[in-house]
Image: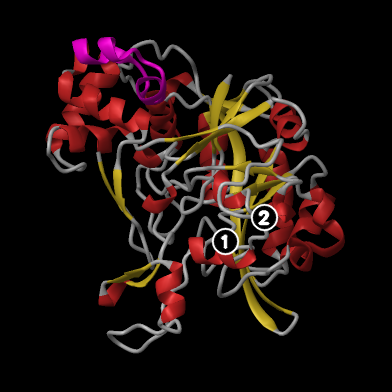
Amino acid sequence: MFIADFHIHSKYSRATSKECVPEMLEMWARRKGIGVVGTGDFTHPGWREELKEKLVPSEEGLYILKDDFRREDKVAGADFEPRFVVTGEISSIYKKNGKVRKVHNLIILPGLEQAEALSQRLEAIGNLHSDGRPILGLDSRDLLEMVLDTCPEAIFIPAHIWTPHFSLFGAYSGFDDIRECFGDLTGSIYALETGLSSDPPMNWRLSALDGFTLVSNSDAHSPMNLGREANIFDTELSYKGIMEALRDRGTKKFYGTIEFFPEEGKYHYDGHRKCNVCWSPSDTIAAGGICPVCGGRITVGVLHRVEALADRPEGFRPSEAKPFESLVPLHEVIASSIASSASSAKVKRKYEDTISTLGPEFYILRGAPLKDIELLAGPYITEGIRRLRCGEIEIQPGYDGEYGKIRI
């Protein structure tokens, strides 16, 4: 088995860390225990040149970092080399059926040559130089057609499908039906990204999604956030293996996902951030969608949107549903356990000590025996991980762009 996180960004995307470079992404993939990480931002010419300089081909459709660029970092038992797969996100803003649509789509490709060919075609449509996630006035259906025409083996995944402002089912700029978005090419899509503010049980409430593999990715804007959501594969380590696992839903090649608690996502509940209004869908409906503080429109969150489109009750589980695990990043567990800020030097030191003695983050969170954790990390962090594994947490839901707050 291996863990994969496809949707990330490089230093060329807006609001991202300057550390989003191949050597730091590879180091943090080792720290996390991620076997395959997306490159992100393949449309940006500067990023493609950097990838060509620093990566070399490994298995079919995958790459590894050149030895010259590898950062020394002590992680117990992390003797694997993370692979890279070519990925990128495109923002399509266009008018369809009388409404402005804003949809983000994730594209996975089998090589940098295909990324070059597709980028050359997209250059004729919009500016690919100013942002690693370009904004194009291109219908999502037409983008899909261009992608498949350039590279029939491409994997096309609608990104964070419930985000209010930029997604397939977004409350303010999306569609109620995937077929309205992609039309005759809907059959060429076989996976959907659920996003940080929803989890599989929320998506299981829509029978229209039964025919798609539900994937989860971090959408990381800094290397430290790699793997906050990810996918678990039980297949060969190759582009073809990944593609077949996503496409063949009846098998266990795509094993399942690692999830945020959806309440921690920044668009789970409804609300108005500047007015400190955080509401459940029923609260919003009772108030007619109007903020009681400023009189403006309440931002409708993911839970509300799911309930609006759902045709099944809460708790329904389809027969072919994949397993999932809900986790909190290790540095947040450590911060809660030692009563410190997640960004503090104290937490950073403890995090590095813990992975250097116990192993990668996912092993610690998911599988390490509690007695081993206690021996090497102490009783408080051990208790934090025990509570996390048992779901003994408290969450203040996120809303209107504000991340939720976790207490362990």
Would you say 165 lies left or right of 335 here? right
User: Given the image, on which type of amino acid does mark 2 rest?
Assistant: Leu
Would you say 22 lies left or right of 18 here? right
Q: How crowded is mark 2: few (under 14 residues within 10 Å), some or many (20 or more)?
A: some
Where residue 155 appears, as percent x and y from the top left, is 72, 43
- Between 204 and 350, the one lying in front of the other is 204
Residue under the image location 60 percent in, 42 percent down: 215
Snapshot quadrant of residue 84? top right
User: Given the image, on which type of amino acid does mark 1 rest?
Assistant: Val
User: Cα distance, mark 2 to mark 1?
Assistant: 8 Å
CB within 8 Å, label 2 to label 1:
yes
Where residue 372 appears, as percent x and y from the top left, is 27, 10
Would you say 184 lies left or right of 174 here? right
The quadrant of the image that shows the C terminus is top left
Considering the numbered disc 1 on the image, is that residue within a helix, a strand or a loop? helix
The quadrant of the image that shows the N terminus is top right
Residue under the image location 44 percent in, 71 percent down: 282
Sequence order check, earlier mark of 2 and 1? 2
Where residue 389 appears, as percent x and y from the top left, is 37, 28
Classified by dominant secondary structure, the portion drawn in magenta counts as helix
Residue topped by disc 2: 206
Colouring style? secondary structure
User: Which residue appears farthest toward the right when viewing the image?
Assistant: 184
Magenta stretch holds residue 366: yes
Snapshot quadrant of residue 141? bottom right
Give the magenta part as a residue range: 358-375
Magenta stretch holds residue 393: no
